[in-house]
Image (cartoon, coloured by chain):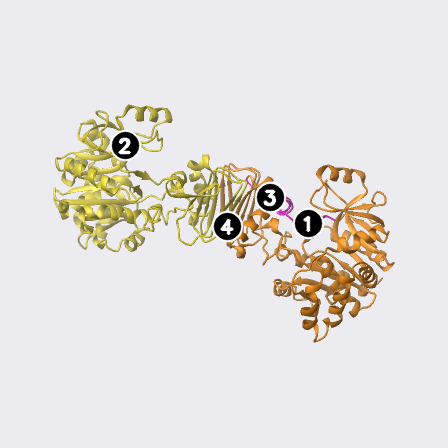
Chain colours: A orange, B yellow
């Protein structure tokens, strides 16, 4: 299959609540340079995908709040390739819209969908795995790239494979599993037959849309009608009319799980340094540098220094040109931004959502 | 003695290092509204003293860095009553300069000296004690007002009295004692014969200057020469010439301790809600309000909220319009200012100086 037949889709949504106050609803993590370079996660995703398809064949699906930021961060991306949802309708709607638009622009094309906020350190290995998965998609399978697990992570969903996974070798996905308990996650990893679900999907658009039509006509019907109007002057009218009717559902639940149960889903295991920059622990481990007793994550070029006196296990994220000074503290996360400061015990970082909920409750939604 | 013969002196110096980053060398604590009102400590001191002497007889001694701030905070204070030291020469030089200037303007007057950064909650009681101490000063004694101790504080010096102290009753001070250990402080408080030294001094200027001449001619000589030139066009020349030669010494050490050994120092014990706003513990206890698990000290009118989820023993000092959010932390001090954030274990607050030293070492003196 030649690269000109491959289309890439990047759903860019989600606010990254566990990275508050760095990540905001109005300024989510994919717009931040959490890559170890000055490129944002979105830009790094673009850089990684565009050699496989060209910017002409890369579609971005995002919300109204982020359309302008996305357009400015990716000046090479044609405007017609930025699909702006009036409001979020979960992943099935976003991916189906992209599939239906591609199907009209390039019938029968293969599309590959990758999140905007993941980090991949071994890009050549990623490209090779994508190549294998594209072959499977061209053969008519609903493909996913499963990540070879490196730890019994409880924060991700898993794919159960038909046999122990071998890198680069395609095999059938028997089941999609929800986020497991620690015990179950340990069993999964020990078995060798489970992969992390990183929501990387590849398929022929006609194959996917047929599956969608069969399983979820309530999504398929309005989305294909919207796609038919997309490249016309009727787009806004049809969107306003039909988008509110599209059910909110995840693509795994709507399509992939039932399709897997019928043997229609396959995977190519990937082992290319994949990271979901989902929380400050990961951020500190991946992108931090050691400063006295702290891991300091530099996310903007003009910070004042971080001072740690008699501290240990501190993760400091200076996002503003301000001194962060800690004295005698341990196992804390300190995040300093222009309008909010977070001080959080490391073992409580999964509950940061409680703070953002409290902020909304108290009328400070602008800080969330 | 009529109020018109009484002059007040307020030395306004010191940077309040233990209150960093709230208090700065360039913006020290006496300029901040740490009073529970919108008046600064300096303004509250002025408000407390001026009924006893009028603004015409109130002298302020400060450094070049703070002269303009002082002038703007106290518009009622005549410009000629702001004595600006070219650089700090410790308390003996500051107080001697004020005494010598007053002696020239009003020979034989009584002067009373009070720090710019102390808080007093019972002002009528304070005025009454000052009245008793002024009587002693008019009688030719070197007077001090000693504070009736409320706890075995190790952060202050003590006065040893000739007998157990009774509020408002004058008695002889036998000795000035340095900051004690906890054990010794407990003995002091139990004895009833020890008072806190709050550096409140009252004397006739001629009496004080004679003591100074006898004990420290190296201070007396240049300072009286400077005072002789103060209200003339030779002030700057003489200051430039002589001020650098003035030894750096505390007034307690230079004059009061040796004078006490000769029975020349007396005290009137005071019990009028005196507080040295020296650290965040005191600030939180005195001026904080309870917010969830925190004591929040409001030092500026436009803060965003402090959020404390599952926290305990947090002292939060928001000095900037920014959210402070803490999750799962206990016994921490969090201070947020425009250009620095402090996160400090409460039992380490006495070591904040280490942070300011480190900042200077690393070239961030502007943040100190």
Structural crowding at the residue carrying mark 2, measured as other residues with C-alpha within 10 Å and reported as few (<14), some (14–19) or many (≥20): many
Asked if the magenta segment contains residue A364, the reply would be no
| Callout 4 secondary element | loop
Residue occupying the point 76% across, 71% down: A228
Same subunit: marks 2 and 4: no
Residue B225 visible to the viewer: no
What range is drawn magenta here?
A: A272-292
Task: Give me the chain letter of mark 3.
Answer: A
Q: Nearer the viewer, residue B62 or A223?
A: A223
The residue wearing badge 3 is: A349
**Discs 1/2, front:** 2
Image position, residue A314 (x, y; %): 56, 41
Same subunit: marks 3 and 1: yes
**Discs 4/1, front:** 1
Task: Give me the chain letter of mark 4.
Answer: A
Q: Which quarter of the rendered picture does the C terminus of chain A lie within?
A: bottom right
Image position, residue A351 (x, y; %): 60, 44
The residue wearing badge 1 is: A276
Same subunit: marks 4 and 1: yes
Report how far apart the C-alphas of labels 1 and 2 lie in the structure.
61 Å
Q: Earlier in the sequence, mark 4 or mark 1?
A: 1
């Amino acid at each position: 299959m030649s690269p000109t037949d491959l289309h890439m889709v990047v759903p860019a949504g989600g606010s990254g609540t566990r990275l508050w106050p760095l990540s905001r609803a109005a300024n989510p993590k994919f717009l931040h340079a959490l890559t170890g370079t000055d490129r944002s996660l979105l830009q790094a995703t673009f850089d990684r995908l565009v050699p496989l398809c060209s910017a002409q064949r890369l579609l971005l699906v995002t919300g109204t709040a982020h359309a302008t930021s996305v357009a400015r961060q990716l000046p090479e991306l044609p405007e017609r390739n930025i699909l702006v949802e009036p409001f979020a309708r979960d992943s099935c709607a976003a991916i189906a819209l992209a599939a239906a638009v591609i199907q009209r622009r390039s019938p029968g094309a293969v599309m590959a969908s990758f999140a905007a906020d993941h980090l991949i350190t071994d890009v050549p290995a990623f490209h090779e795995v994508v190549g294998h998965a594209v072959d499977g998609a061209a053969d008519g399978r609903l493909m996913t790239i499963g990540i070879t697990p490196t730890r019994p992570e409880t924060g991700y969903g898993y794919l159960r494979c038909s046999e122990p996974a071998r890198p680069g070798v395609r095999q059938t996905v028997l089941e999609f599993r929800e986020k497991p308990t620690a015990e179950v996650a340990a069993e999964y990893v020990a078995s060798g037959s489970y992969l992390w679900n990183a929501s990387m999907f590849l398929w022929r658009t006609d194959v996917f849309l047929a599956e969608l039509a069969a399983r979820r006509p309530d999504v398929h019907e309005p989305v294909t009608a919207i796609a038919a109007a997309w490249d016309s002057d009727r787009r806004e009218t049809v969107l306003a009319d039909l988008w509110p009717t599209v059910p909110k559902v995840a693509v795994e639940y709507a399509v992939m799980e039932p399709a897997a149960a019928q043997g229609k889903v396959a995977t190519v295991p990937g082992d290319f340094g994949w990271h979901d920059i989902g929380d400050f622990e990961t951020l500190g481990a991946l992108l931090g540098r050691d400063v006295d007793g702290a891991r300091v994550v530099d996310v903007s070029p003009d910070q004042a220094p971080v001072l740690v006196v008699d501290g240990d296990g501190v993760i400091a994220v200076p996002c503003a040109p301000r001194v962060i000074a800690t004295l005698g503290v341990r196992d804390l996360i300190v995040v300093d931004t222009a309008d909010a400061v977070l001080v959080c015990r490391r073992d409580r970082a999964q509950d940061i959502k409680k703070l953002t909920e409290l902020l909304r409750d108290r009328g400070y939604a602008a800080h969330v």
